[in-house]
């Protein structure tokens, strides 16, 4: 049984969290496919996202030593104890956020893998154990209930040795990590991206957002999580010198708006996938990689749920 590689179609309601048994079956299906089949499906998904065969290199790589980077995650989830913990955390994602469940899973796996199997109330530092630099300051914007955030405590702010800027993390229960990643995806998309689209387009915003493909929407969500702001886009400056860490989601939106106006056409937000110039920034490459992995897992889960439906009907 080979999962369908088509990212915009499939008999799957991804707003429902998979059960522990589903997670195990998904993972074992992915492992049984074999290296060649896994690569073929992933490359077909990646091509839809304008990614090269084999994916990007560096932090955004899809493949390691000729096989999917996801292989380690699949191996982890194939164990029933780990799968039960993953399902517990994904159920909380569905309960408390509107994030795409499998994008949340992939995000947590790439940010701090142990978050996926954490189920304890032990307090952890969100900066040292998850890279959530500003969680204490942004907690009110995440849309999470006070029954969760009320248990959090501030970590004394300090200057990050990586960015040389002050950070304001929080002490949170270990089991809150995955749901926080999911909430941050939604918050960054709404406040960092959608609000800017609304401000730029006004009454035309809803129609423009509705025209987006599901794959493009996931890409903007992943991008907004990684880089919710961005420097001002300077049309007069060469693109190549702007494509650094400052080329955040708002910079990309400004670039696409400028191109649409120059060409006398409506803004097409699907161009986050199809404009080759945007592949020049690490943020877009990383966002596409996360979306490709989420869609690959979605295909596996679709096969699992389809098999269950056929068994129930028999």
Image (cartoon, grey):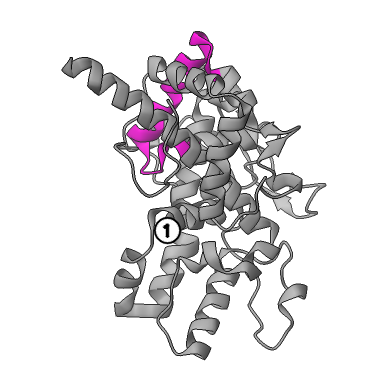
Q: Residue at x 54, y 36 (%)?
A: 106
**Which residue is at the front of the view, 124 or 196?**
196
Q: Which residues are magenta?
A: 77-104
Left/right placement of residue 7 relative to residue 204 reads: right
Q: Residue at x 38, y 59 (%)?
A: 213
Q: Residue at x 80, y 48 (%)?
A: 162
Q: Main secondary structure of the magenta part?
A: helix
Q: Residue at x 43, y 73 (%)?
A: 268
Percent x, y for residue 224?
Answer: 53, 56
Say what secondary structure mark 1 lies in. Answer: helix
Q: Quadrant of the C terminus?
A: top left
Percent x, y for residue 299?
Answer: 42, 35
Q: How many marks?
A: 1
Left/right placement of residue 38 relative to residue 211 reads: right
**Which residue is at the front of the view, 179 or 23?**
23
Percent x, y for residue 281?
Answer: 69, 62
Q: Quadrant of the N terminus?
A: top left
**Which residue is at the front of the view, 111 or 310?**
310
Q: Is residue 57 above or below residue 181?
A: below
Q: Is residue 119 above or below residue 200?
A: above
Which residue is disc 1 drawn over?
190
- Name, please, the residue furthest toward the left: 313
Mark 1 Cα shell of 10 Å, populated few (<14), some (14-19), many (≥20) = some
Can I make out residue 159 in this image?
A: no
Please tell me whether residue 85 belongs to the stretch shown in magenta.
yes
């Amino acid at each position: 049984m080979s999962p369908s590689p088509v990212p915009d179609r499939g008999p799957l309601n991804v707003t429902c969290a998979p059960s522990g048994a589903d997670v195990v079956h998904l993972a074992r299906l992915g492992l049984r496919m074999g290296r060649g089949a896994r690569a073929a499906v992933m490359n077909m998904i990646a091509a839809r996202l304008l990614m090269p065969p084999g994916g990007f290199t560096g932090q955004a790589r899809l493949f390691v030593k000729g096989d999917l980077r996801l292989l380690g995650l699949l191996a982890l989830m194939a164990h029933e104890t780990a799968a039960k913990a993953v399902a517990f955390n994904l159920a909380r994602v569905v309960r408390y956020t509107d994030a795409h469940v499998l994008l949340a899973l992939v995000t947590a796996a790439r940010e701090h893998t142990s978050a996926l199997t954490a189920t304890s109330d032990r307090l952890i530092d969100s900066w040292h154990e998850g890279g959530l630099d500003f969680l204490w300051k942004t907690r009110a914007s995440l849309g999470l209930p006070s029954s969760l955030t009320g248990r959090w405590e501030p970590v004394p702010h300090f200057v990050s040795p990586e960015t040389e800027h002050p950070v304001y993390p929080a002490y949170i229960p270990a089991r809150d990590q995955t749901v926080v990643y999911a909430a941050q995806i939604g918050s960054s998309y709404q406040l960092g991206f959608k609000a800017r689209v609304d401000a730029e387009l006004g009454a035309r915003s809803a129609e423009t957002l509705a025209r987006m493909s599901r794959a493009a929407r996931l890409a903007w969500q992943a991008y907004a999580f990684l880089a919710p702001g961005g420097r001002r886009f300077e049309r007069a400056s060469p693109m190549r010198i702007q494509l650094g860490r400052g080329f955040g989601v708002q910079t990309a939106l400004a670039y696409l708006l400028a191109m649409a106006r120059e060409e006398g056409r409506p803004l097409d937000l699907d161009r986050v996938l199809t404009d080759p110039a945007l592949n020049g920034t690490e943020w877009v490459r990383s966002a596409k990689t996360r979306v490709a992995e989420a869609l690959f897992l979605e295909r596996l889960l679709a096969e699992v749920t389809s098999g269950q439906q056929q068994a129930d009907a028999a």
